[in-house]
Image (cartoon, grey):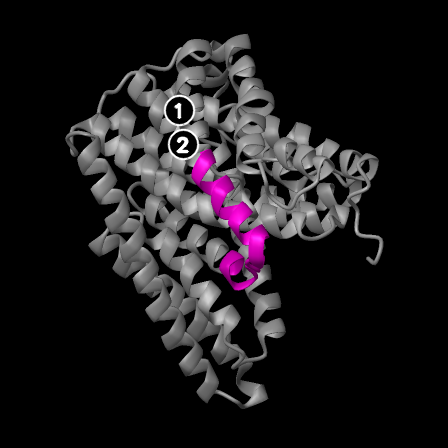
Amino acid sequence: MTPERLGLLWGITVFAGAIARLISSITGFPSVVILLLSGLLIGRSGLGLVEPLDLGQGLETIVGLLVCLVLFEGGLNLKLPEGSIRNTVLRISLLRLIISLAGGILIAHLFAGLSWPVAGVYSAIVLATGPTVISPLVEQIKLASPLSDVLKAEGLVLEPIGAVLALLLLELLLGDLHGLREVLIALMQRLGGGVVIGVVAGWLLSEILKKIKNQSSFGIELQITVGIIFLVYGICEYILPESGLPASVAAGFIVGKREVIDKERLDNLISELAQLAITVLFPLLASDVSWGELSPLGWGGVICVLSMMIIVRPISISLATIGQELDFKERIFLAWLAPRGIVTAAVASLFSIRLEQAGVLGAGRLQGLVFLTILMTVGIQGLTAKPLASFLNLIDSKN
């Protein structure tokens, strides 16, 4: 690809994302849906102006760096609920890991026609809710605590787990791993290794920021923060692929808990960078989806996603909240709201490329089904979240 063509690709992608954000701010429609639609318009499904594969091997690195920036921002603002509510988050995460994974595999195979191994990869990819969608949605509808904290924490806990598990199931499918025992060992290694590296990096970053007390040097603080985030990602990917995701969340969480800097100002700037990353990533990744990958799914794909929304999630939430301090109305809302976000889209796009290169059948259907899941969950649940919260009297009246 020529430098001129590469510059045009980035220019069109960023401009499309910016216009999508503008439309969202004017109409109030969920920005993620419009960002995805803008990607479909400029990509293979529409005008054919953007082809992510033209970026070559650099695509995975660019996506990984931007996703880690988004997850660091999520960890920076993560508020772990106290007491029994914390136990609720852990129970939801554990049971959803088991029930949603198994249910997703079965449903994707039966209704969407994916082979069992590819269905396993799909189920792991869409396992987690998207913090990049949940957080602004919860703030927009002014959802009361502790439900708002539960939803945010659930996404940040499960998203790295789902991404790492999806990678390991992909490696199992491609023959790089042999048996579920190796998958479980590798899962613990990459999650544990990522968290350890992230905690160390977060502590180191907070210590460096503690030494920078000059108010006029805040730009340096931001640059140091971004530099360490990207360095952590590079080290993690070099040592343990995909461990950069849990490392980013852990690093952000540690920095957020140590009161050594002007956290609010840093948070505002990191948040803006994260939003810019989302504005670029969603159109870029969606541009790689073609109608040829969505249309063969037909009603089977729609039924698959609806089953995940109205059967699998409610079952897992119902079991996880037995005996917990959440009333019936809160459980209903929790069972309904589960939109998927940017990490889901990023992982699906990158894995689809690897499957296509390996000659595995169903790679295009996998990507199409994942993006259909994002569109339906964000579109349907995003539009109905505020009316449902109002009907159930779950809106915080103090805001």
Q: Does the magenta segment cover residue 163?
A: no
Residue drawn at (66%, 41%), measured in percent from left and top? 31
259 vs 185: above or below: below
Q: Residue 77 colored magenta?
A: yes
Determine which quarter of the picture holds residue 270.
bottom right
In the image: residue 93, left or right of residue 399: left
Q: Which residue is depicted at the point 60% across and 22% down?
A: 310
Left or right side of 259 for 171: left
Name the residue that disc number 1 marks.
102
Location of the N terminus by quadrant is top left
- The magenta region covers 73-96
The kind of secondary structure element at disc 1 is helix
How far, Cα to Cα, is label 2 from label 1?
6 Å
Residue appearing at x 45%, y 35% in the figure: 95
- Secondary structure under tag 2 reads helix
Q: Position of residue 119 (x, y in %)?
A: 36, 21
